[in-house]
Amino acid sequence: MPTFSERGAGMPSSPIRKLAPFAAAAEGEGVKIYHLNIGQPDIPTPEKAIEAIRRISRTTLEYSPSQGFLSLRQAFSRYYSRYGITVDPEEIIVTSGGSFALLFTFMSCLDPGDEIIIPEPSYANYFSFAKSAGAVVRTVTSRIEDGFALPPVEEFEKMITPKTKAILICNPNNPTGGLYSPEEMQRLREIVLRHDLFLLSDEVYREFVYDGAAYCSALSLEGLDDNVIVIDSVSKRYSECGIRIGMMVTRNAALRAVMMKFCQARLSPPLLGQIVAENSVDGTEDYQKKVYDEYISRRDFIVKGLNRIPGVFTNLPGGAFYTIVRLPVEDAEDFCRWCLTDFRYTGVLPGGETVMLAPAAGFYATPGLGRNEVRIAYVLNKEDLGRALDVLARALEEYRSR
């Protein structure tokens, strides 16, 4: 039998989806699972966007330009202006979701063996994209005790070598829900300028910044026009994960020319997805306000409920819709698997109930970190979140008494 690639063999498993077979088996037995493991919002997509699909009059579903439809890029340009960010439509390249934006950015900026610094815990797929590009990830660790603030400049400086090519951040952050302050962003700016690095900034949760905190996009940092690449997506903004529309945004024209080679090789971004996205950008301000208010309410509810459970701790997230939770267990992955394979909270629903969480160790690159932590996505309505909290509390009680 032919052997598969070492790259494929070394690709990390997703901590978000690796327990999916156990969940499928439980659901097949009639168990109600509260999915807190994945950032799939339960909030409806804007009706305006759904209606755009119904109105499609095309007789041929054709290729689009490799950089995406101009009208969509113009809509995105208007969107950025609402945040005080000036972006020309030519500085936006539409991709097949934020995932391909990340992959193409890695492939365009990094050669095999180049190093990229990422604060951990981080979105687990960053490690997969780095592996695909042959890049080496070096991490600086943020800690739950510090609210997952950006690690000190000294920690970044210790990681920088002649092979260092880029720093990647997620702001607001997945998986921590942390928000980097303008002061922290300025410190990053100084590091990037001092060492002439790329700054890759994943900003797909831009709308979800809470408590009146100031938000600073990497595109707003002065003197970094040739260094900054912003990764963006409509998936979480409009509950449109399935249309697979994201974008790369950079003012570096030479880099865009390189990125376009990868975009041309994959031909074009999704046609139908672009139609939906374009009809989501304008005229949905009321929708976005309602979604924002709903997530604030969910955040406050879930954080208060989690911290009431004996031995459980989480911070109050400043953004996104995730939080890292410390549990009173030694091995959170074992606990998460046990919840799906063995535990059933009975007495309310005929098949019983359980919870599905994402073990946080998969969001760290450093072995041993996050072993007693999970990531929770508060993407369910508050009634379901309340049930999930009850189920989690009972599960922890039973697991620890075994």
Image (tube, rainbow, N blue to C red):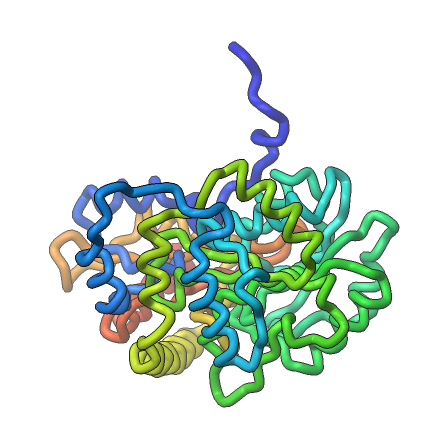
Question: Residue at the bottom extreme?
Answer: 212
Q: Residue at x 83, y 57 (%)?
A: 160
Residue 37 percent coordinates (x, y): 39, 57
Residue 21 percent coordinates (x, y): 34, 40
Q: Residue at x 45, y 43 (%)?
A: 268
Q: Residue at x 45, y 75 (%)?
A: 207
Residue 354 percent coordinates (x, y): 28, 57
Q: Nearer the viewer, residue 394 or 131?
A: 131
Left or right of 401, for residue 370: right
Left or right of 11, for residue 243: left
When asked about the image quadrant of residue 70, the answer is bottom left
Q: Quadrant of the C terminus?
A: bottom left
Q: Nearer the viewer, residue 380 or 52?
A: 52
User: Quick check: can you spot residue 127?
Assistant: no
Left or right of 205, for residue 236: left
Q: How many marks?
A: 0
Q: Is residue 283 above or below residue 39?
A: below
Left or right of 352, for residue 145: right
User: Quick check: can you spot residue 80?
Assistant: yes
Q: Nearer the viewer, residue 85 or 123?
A: 85
Q: Residue at x 64, y 53 (%)?
A: 256
Residue 22 percent coordinates (x, y): 33, 42
Question: Residue at the top extreme?
Answer: 1
